[in-house]
Amino acid sequence: MPYRLTRQVFLNAVACPRLGWFSRLDNPPHELDPEQGSLAGRYLLQEARDVHARARVLFPNASTVTRQAYEAACWQTQDLMDHPSTHTILEAAFGTSTCRARPDAVVRLGDDWRVCEIKTALNRTRALVDDLAFSWMVLDQAGVNLGGASLILLSRDYRPGMLDEALFTTVDVSREAASRAAEFGELVVQVDEMTRGDEPPQPALTAHCGACPLFRSCTGKGLEHPVFDLPHLTPARLRSLLDSGVTTIESIADASLLTPRQSLAWHSVLKNEVILTGDLRGDLDVVAWPARYLDFETVATAIPLFPDLAPLEPFPFVYSVRTCDQPGRMRSHKVFLSPHNRDASEDMAERLLQDAGQEGSIIVYSPREARVIRWLAERIPGLAGHLRALLPRVVELERIVRRDVCHPGFRGTMSLQAILPALVPGFSYIDLEIEESTTEAATFAYLARGGYYSEERAPLARRDLAAYCARDTLALVRMHEALHTLAGG
């Protein structure tokens, strides 16, 4: 077990001591970092390195801590800080008896120092401030005089071809970081003791459990329908239920305090049956045939892949369209996969207008496809009118399911990952080389960047991209068919 608390271990322990204990192990459970070793995880790590390398331009004449061993890095950092000529230190290392931190940069402000963290994000969030606050706490306890704290985020105004300085925007979070660091400082000794024992702390069901990656092997073990599966559950209502001893939906004795939608979910679980909550038959009858089932896949990279893209702007690179003349009866299937060496948005828009036809509904799962169509319309003004004419034809299955169906297998969410197995048992992606959207996006990003796939492997990767998107539209067809069966069609 590591001698000192790292940032991730500490923040996990603040949320849940048991989670912190598992995080502190030399070999933490795979669930705590599911992307580790995956294609998506490798791409995110490489991109973070690229962003940090570009951010060096913000710190001219900076000194870099080069020692790898932690104690040696701390000594090197102190030596640099002791030289009055040192203005900025990158990859500095600091330690106390309980914690260690390596902020991305510390900048001299007279007799004080400003601590900076570089993030591949567009917006300041509580989690990012907490990351910085941990560094603030460690530096403060190590005797560093702190005069400020900054998050260095990505700028929406950056476009490829601009100078690297334009990629970043700096946000001062000194007050928030100092306040949060003071709170953390009062918890350090307790967190260290709780995460250092030979055995993990006893599990306790809390509001954090529902979002914990270890939930199913911890407090959620054996719970078929935990209370977190209630839809639209506010934090206050969740705490009230947990305080009253409620752990599962079945253990709720009185549904009178639940919202109408939560009450329906409660009845659905107790009866173990699907409850139709609206006019499913009528909502399905709005579909005009022949119908097109449409799915886009997008990629959002910190460093844009193509000109005129902003950092983390979703870029559509593949779509699948299946045409059916009645539920479940497919007539044709078309896939458009963009070349990975250029922006082919206009080609995609032209092909989409052909494949979508002039009549019939366009069936999608969520609002994402309509957003992509609007994005294409803004990007290709010459086709904007034709593209926007597709929008009135769009029918969202998610909206229909949300309004009309309550299923014990939905588990309080409308995500496709929950809805699909509940409505179409046995439907799977397991036979594909790409089984989830994060791998799909990373595959295209690696193809666009070059250097990862060989000339022989690239065509196979492109085949896998098309196959995954095609499976998504097949899922829409099967889901729509299942909804018709539920409606008695």
Image (spheres, rainbow, N blue to C red):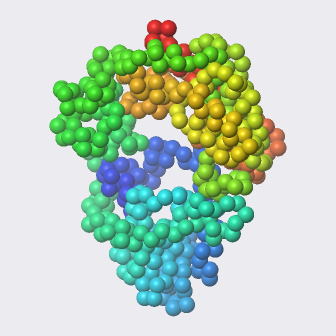
**Residue 115 visible in rendering:** yes
Please tell me which residue lies in front, 200 or 124: 124
The percent coordinates of residue 314 (x first, y second) are 61, 47
Q: Position of residue 16 (x, y in %)?
A: 32, 50
- Residue 362: x and y in percent read 61, 26
Q: Residue at x 49, y 23 (%)?
A: 421
Residue 447 visible: no
User: In the image, residue 387 lies at what x, y percent?
Assistant: 67, 36
Looking at the picture, does residue 20 appear above or below residue 474?
below
Q: Is residue 258 left or right of residue 120?
A: left
Relative side of 95 to 53, left or right: left
Q: Quadrant of residue 466?
A: top right
> Residue 167 sits in which quadrant?
bottom right
On screen, residue 112 above or below 326:
below
Residue drawn at point x = 56 percent, y = 37 percent: 368
Above or below, 2 against 411 in this view is: below
Residue under the image location 34 percent in, 75 percent down: 141
